[in-house]
């Protein structure tokens, strides 16, 4: 070790020590104070001697270690070379030769594999050694030599990714008056590295060094880099805008002008300068419509604005450039952008753009949220016809008429289940049952139980339920029954509403045996005391009545009427059906008594109106036309808009007008 060598040299050069002097003085019998004076004078002389000897020894050992460093470097003995380099770095004294040896080692390590970090360490050692030399021997190196050496150090540190350390030496280089092209290129490299690492303040300072150096080929890039640093910090948007404007003013034809405009637009929006941001956006579209920055600006505008039908420059771009946008991963990555394009295309009447945007959403909107928002926004904008047209595209789907094998062979998903479900739910909410029924009819081609085909076509149980309901609502109970069976038997649905719907369609379209089985399954899904048991009993009663088991049917209906937790509509319907059983048996007096009880349950509900018309018919069967006329007139007066009113008017016209105005149902 260097320190050990220095200590050895000092001890070899010292003929006497303070301890031996003290012994000699004592042996000669000097007085204490005299001995102290002699000892103090000797210690001072000894210290001067040691310092001189140490310097001589240190200089000699520095030369030796430097020689060893050069030998190890030449022999590529990197571990030994690094040890020698650390000895030199730890020594207060330095020399041009030792600095040169350090730099030579750093360069050799740079060119050797897997030694980048060691090279950076040696570069740093060389820089510190050089700064010590400048302090100790200012005449050893002139400013140009020192500056160029430090510049090489900065480049070496930058190559190792140590841009912060490199930045520190750049300022020293500039202080030495070095600002030539190589220094500027190094500044730009280091500034770029600092920017990539997020060291925005240091990067800005480095770019500023280049700007302040005057005209150079890198000046435009430096101005843009400085502006980018200020903008990215987000701490001073006005300063960032000013820096961007400086770039745009001095370099209006630069290739990065679109990026600068985009950056300025972002800063303006962030600082609340809406009008100025719009002007930057317009300038981008007007002068740089085909640039990537313009595309990013359009995506940003789509994401920042409310998702609604819009007009103006943005909508115009979304319509006229839809082909480029649909092919762009950047644009398609933002579903809001695609949705804005779809809204603009629908409002602008561009069928091709509308189809392309709708298909893009169909394949990407996994949750269906964007789908629902698009349809609702079109309705709110009084464009229901557009909403229906797009909903049909998502609900009915292409490929109708292709075989199941052809669909499966492609393997390409046509639509997500989220999109198709959202469109179907929208159709159900808006009463477009015929749209769902038509889609259900077309979809029967692909009902083979294949999960793959169902996934390709975005058909889940929710979609199938809505198809079944659409068929039921449009009067095709038989087709609806097939769908409900698939949902339960193939899809495994076990929820009570689905089981009840299946039981209901089985009661109307299936066999008695199947209806009984489905009703039993629905009943098993709830507790006997549940209010929903009333609905099951109504269906069960209907099956019994179809088999002419009137007593058993009435028993079930009476249980519904007695169930206080059942809703008013179910209880009113049950009481009306009791009257119907008597009417079917031609027990008209019993029927009238049963109908009279409906109003007390249903009030002004639909079953009271139905009871009035049926009671009137029962009175007619008994030849009591006066009471029948009262029933009909009461119905017309109280329920003029009901489905039974027109029939009641016709019956009144055929009966004698001599009738009481008091309802016989209230007697």
Image (cartoon, rainbow, N blue to C red):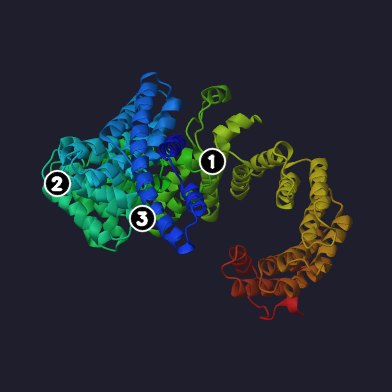
Give the CA distance from mark 3 to mark 1. 38 Å
Determine if residue 262 is in view: no
Give the CA distance from mark 2 to mark 3. 40 Å
Side (left or right) of 618 relative to 273: right
Q: For residue 438, which numbered disc appears in the image?
A: 1
Residue 138, x across and y down, in percent: 20, 44
Quadrant containing the C terminus is bottom right
Q: Secondary structure at mark 1?
A: helix
Give the CA distance from mark 1 to mark 2. 75 Å
Is the C-beta separation of discs 2 and 3 under 8 Å? no
First in sequence, mark 2 or 3: give its number.
2
Q: Secondary structure at mark 2?
A: loop
In this view, the mark in front (3 or 1)? 3
Q: For residue 213, which numbered disc appears in the image?
A: 2
Query: Going 33% across and 49% down the picture, which residue do you hit?
Result: 344
- Total numbered circles: 3
Query: Going 19% across and 36% down the picture, which residue do you hit?
Result: 145
Q: Secondary structure at mark 3?
A: helix
Residue 283, x across and y down, in percent: 18, 50
Q: For residue 304, which numbered disc appears in the image?
A: 3
Residue 301, x across and y down, in percent: 32, 52
Few, some or many C-alpha atoms within 10 Å of disc 3 (few <14, some 14-19, many ≥20)? few
């Amino acid at each position: 070790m260097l320190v050990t060598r220095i200590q050895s040299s000092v001890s070899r050069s010292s003929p006497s020590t303070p301890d031996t002097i003290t012994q000699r003085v004592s042996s000669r019998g000097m007085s204490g104070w005299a001995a102290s004076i002699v000892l103090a004078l000797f210690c001072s002389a000894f210290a001067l001697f040691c310092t001189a000897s140490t310097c001589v020894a240190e200089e000699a050992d520095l030369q030796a270690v430097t020689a060893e460093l050069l030998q190890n470097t030449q022999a590529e003995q990197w571990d030994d070379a690094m040890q020698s380099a650390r000895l030199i770095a730890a020594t207060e004294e330095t020399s041009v030769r030792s600095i040169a040896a350090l730099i030579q080692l750093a360069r050799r390590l740079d060119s050797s594999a897997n030694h980048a970090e060691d090279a950076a360490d040696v570069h740093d050692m060389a820089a510190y050694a050089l700064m010590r030399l400048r302090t100790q021997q200012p005449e050893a190196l002139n400013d140009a030599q020192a500056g160029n050496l430090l510049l090489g150090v900065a480049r070496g540190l930058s190559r190792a990714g140590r841009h912060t350390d490199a930045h520190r030496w750049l300022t020293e280089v500039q202080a030495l008056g070095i600002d030539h092209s190589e220094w500027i290129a190094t500044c730009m490299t280091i500034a770029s590295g600092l920017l990539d690492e997020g060291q925005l303040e240091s990067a800005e300072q480095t770019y500023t060094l280049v700007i302040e150096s005057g005209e150079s080929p890198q000046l435009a890039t430096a101005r843009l880099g400085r502006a980018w640093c200020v903008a990215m910090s987000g701490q001073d948007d006005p300063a960032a805008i000013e820096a961007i404007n400086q770039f745009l003013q001095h370099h209006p034809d630069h290739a990065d002008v679109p990026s600068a405009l985009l950056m300025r637009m972002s800063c303006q929006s962030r600082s609340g300068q809406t009008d100025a941001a719009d002007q930057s956006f317009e300038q981008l579209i007007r002068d740089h419509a085909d640039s990537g920055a313009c595309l990013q600006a359009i995506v940003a505008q789509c994401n920042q604005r409310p998702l609604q039908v819009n007009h103006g420059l943005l909508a115009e771009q979304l319509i006229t450039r839809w082909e480029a946008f649909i092919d762009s991963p950047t644009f398609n990555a933002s579903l809001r952008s695609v949705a804005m394009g779809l809204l603009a295309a629908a409002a602008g009447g561009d069928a091709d753009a509308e189809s392309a945007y709708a298909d893009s959403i169909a394949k990407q909107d996994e949750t269906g949220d964007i789908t629902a928002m698009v349809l609702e926004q079109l309705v709110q904008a009084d464009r229901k016809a557009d909403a229906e047209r797009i909903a049909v595209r998502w609900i009915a789907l292409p490929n109708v008429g292709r075989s199941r094998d052809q669909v499966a062979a492609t393997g390409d998903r046509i639509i997500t289940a989220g999109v198709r479900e959202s469109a179907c739910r929208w159709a159900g909410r808006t009463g477009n049952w015929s749209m769902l029924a038509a889609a259900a009819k077309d979809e029967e081609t692909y009902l083979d139980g294949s999960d793959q085909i169902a996934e390709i076509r975005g058909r889940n149980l929710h979609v199938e339920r809505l198809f079944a309901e659409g068929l039921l609502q449009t009067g095709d109970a038989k087709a609806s029954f097939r769908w409900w069976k698939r949902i339960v038997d193939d899809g495994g649905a076990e929820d009570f509403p689905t089981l009840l719907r299946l039981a209901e369609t089985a009661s109307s379209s299936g066999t008695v045996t199947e209806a009984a089985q489905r009703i039993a399954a629905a009943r098993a899904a709830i507790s006997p005391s549940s209010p929903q048991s009333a609905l099951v009993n109504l269906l069960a009663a209907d099956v019994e009545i179809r088999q002419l088991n009137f007593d058993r049917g009435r028993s079930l209906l009476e249980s519904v009427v007695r169930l206080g937790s059942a809703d008013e509509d179910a209880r009113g319907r049950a009481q009306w059906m009791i009257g119907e059983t008597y009417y079917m048996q031609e027990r008209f007096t019993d029927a009238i008594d049963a109908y009279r009880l409906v109003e007390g349950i249903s009030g002004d509900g639909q079953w009271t109106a139905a009871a009035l018309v049926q009671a009137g018919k029962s009175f007619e069967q008994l030849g009591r036309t006066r009471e029948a006329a009262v029933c009909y007139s009461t119905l017309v007066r109280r329920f003029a808009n009901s489905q039974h009113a027109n029939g009641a008017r016709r019956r009144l016209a055929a009966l004698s007008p001599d009738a009481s105005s008091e309802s016989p149902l209230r007697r």
